[in-house]
Image (tube, rainbow, N blue to C red):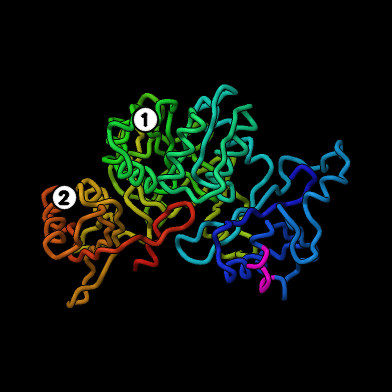
């Protein structure tokens, strides 16, 4: 970005087929990859626009190396003549609803998120040490580990490995960060992997942040009881670059995603675009200075998402009278059961409160009469047996907590749920 080039960060956990699609879709002229990943790009390079390939961290296939170019580079090269309104980078969506698409962001967007979220909400300073389990090839992790620490002068700790409960706990103990950024699934897994006796292991934390999916109230409350540290839940998106709706430190309302950030405006709208009343469910649309300008090479989808100053999120929310927003699900995930809308997230939040449940994803399924009812895919705690007796126990548990029509008619026990690399459950795969 400094020289005026437009980087397109890529998830290092993708398949060769994914890379072939993205390299062709982006029409990139230069590919930079670590030497141990370059083998996955063999198929992608054949019919692409790539003219230069650079290997990082070691030589591969006779390609020039990043290290070699840096050794011969001029240390005080002038930056490119970019403006705040020049394209800075593209970020491919994580694919929770299918093939990823590239959101085009401007140089101004990066500073906007650092000011209105990192500084004004998190109070990030040069004294902070930041650790993000979310990686820098996604919008959430890019802000957490790169732009926010650079803007504030803070220290970033980064993890090369996949963020498992074991690897994350090891980093938290070894580097003693003051801020930790995770996703709801990881927080639930960390709770399952620890006990109240482990509180001292995370004693350096002044604040935790969750995004990617809505944080279940039970997970937030159990985390704060165990570790004495709030989880500030927020909503962001690739299209908006980072979080634009968030709880605030010191006044977290678990079960809610919080209030609009400074610099952002939020509306809830119905099917025809009209604002809905307080207490009614609507699609959340947002206006703010970090919105992408378009999806690369996807005109129709750009027009559908970026509508003047407003960006559609596809998320269904309900607002309280005091401006707190509560998540109800994705627009394409909502279920109409017996003529009444049901939020899969509400059913998931009820199930996750049961001690046997580690993770859960709820989608719609059709019964013998062709009617849609909730179905739950459940990961249970180690040592338990996923049998009919446990399934009935979980159904009864939900019936006791929610309106009877919302309980899952089917429960399927699975070893794991399909997720994106950011930890979002891929409900389209469950469907």
Farthest residue to the top: give it: 127
Residue 328 coordinates in the image, percent (x, y): 32, 50
Horizontal side, residue 294 vs residue 206: left or right: right
Instruction: Give the quadrant of residue 59.
Output: bottom right
Residue 406 appearing in the image = yes
Q: Position of residue 53 (x, y in %)?
A: 77, 62
Instruction: Indicate the position of residue 211 as horizontal and vertical percent values.
Output: 43, 43
Which percent across, then down, holds residue 193? 33, 44
Specify whether residue 228 is painted magenta.
no
Looking at the rendering, the stretch of residues picked out in magenta corresponds to 38-44
Task: Give the secondary structure at mark 1.
Answer: loop
Q: How many marks?
A: 2
Give the labeled residue for mark 1.
Answer: 230
Prevailing secondary structure class for the magenta stretch in the rendered image: helix
Is residue 43 within the magenta segment? yes
Identity of the residue drawn at 31% across and 37% down: 220
Q: Which mark is residue 402?
A: 2
Q: CA distance from mark 1 to mark 2?
A: 26 Å
Q: Quadrant of the N terminus?
A: top right
Q: Out of 321 and 365, give the one closest to the viewer.
A: 365
At horizontal 68% and vertical 64% (from top left) the residue drawn is 38
Residue 106, numbered label: none
């Amino acid at each position: 970005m400094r020289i005026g080039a437009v980087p397109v960060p890529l998830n290092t956990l993708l398949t060769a087929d994914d890379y072939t699609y993205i390299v062709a879709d982006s029409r990139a002229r230069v590919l930079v990859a670590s030497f141990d990943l370059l083998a996955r790009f063999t198929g992608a390079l054949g019919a692409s626009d790539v003219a230069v390939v650079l290997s990082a961290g070691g030589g591969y296939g006779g390609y020039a190396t990043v290290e070699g170019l840096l050794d011969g580079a001029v240390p005080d090269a002038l930056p490119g003549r970019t403006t705040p309104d020049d394209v800075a980078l593209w970020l491919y969506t994580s694919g929770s609803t299918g093939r990823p698409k590239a959101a085009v962001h401007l140089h101004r967007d990066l500073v906007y998120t650092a000011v209105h979220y990192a500084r004004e909400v998190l109070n990030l300073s040069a004294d902070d040490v930041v650790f993000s389990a979310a990686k820098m090839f996604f919008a959430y992790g890019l802000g957490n580990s790169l732009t926010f620490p650079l803007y504030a002068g803070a220290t970033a700790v980064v993890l090369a490995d996949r963020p498992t409960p074991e690897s994350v706990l090891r980093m938290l103990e070894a580097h003693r960060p003051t801020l930790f950024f995770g996703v709801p699934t990881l927080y639930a897994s960390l709770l399952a992997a620890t006990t109240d006796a482990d509180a001292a292991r995370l004693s350096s934390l002044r604040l935790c942040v969750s995004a990617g999916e809505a944080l279940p109230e039970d997970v937030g409350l159990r985390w704060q009881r165990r570790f004495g540290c709030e989880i500030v839940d927020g909503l962001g998106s690739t299209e908006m670059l980072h979080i634009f709706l968030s709880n605030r430190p010191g006044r977290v309302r678990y079960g809610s995603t919080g209030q609009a950030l400074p610099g952002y405006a939020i509306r809830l709208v119905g099917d025809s675009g009209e604002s809905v009343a307080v207490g009614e469910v609507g699609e959340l649309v947002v206006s703010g200075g970090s919105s992408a300008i378009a999806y690369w090479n996807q005109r129709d989808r750009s027009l559908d998402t970026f509508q003047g100053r407003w960006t559609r999120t596809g998320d269904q929310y309900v607002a309280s009278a005091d401006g707190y927003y509560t998540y109800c699900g994705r627009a394409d995930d909502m279920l109409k059961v017996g003529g009444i809308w049901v939020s899969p997230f509400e059913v998931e939040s009820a199930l996750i409160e049961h001690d046997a449940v580690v993770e859960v994803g709820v989608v719609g399924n059709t019964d013998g009469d062709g009617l849609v009812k909730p179905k739950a895919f459940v990961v249970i705690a180690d040592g338990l047996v996923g049998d009919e007796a446990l399934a009935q126990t979980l159904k009864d548990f939900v019936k006791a907590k929610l309106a009877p029509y919302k309980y899952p008619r089917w429960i399927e026990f699975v070893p794991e749920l399909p997720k994106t690399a950011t930890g979002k459950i891929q409900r389209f795969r469950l469907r």
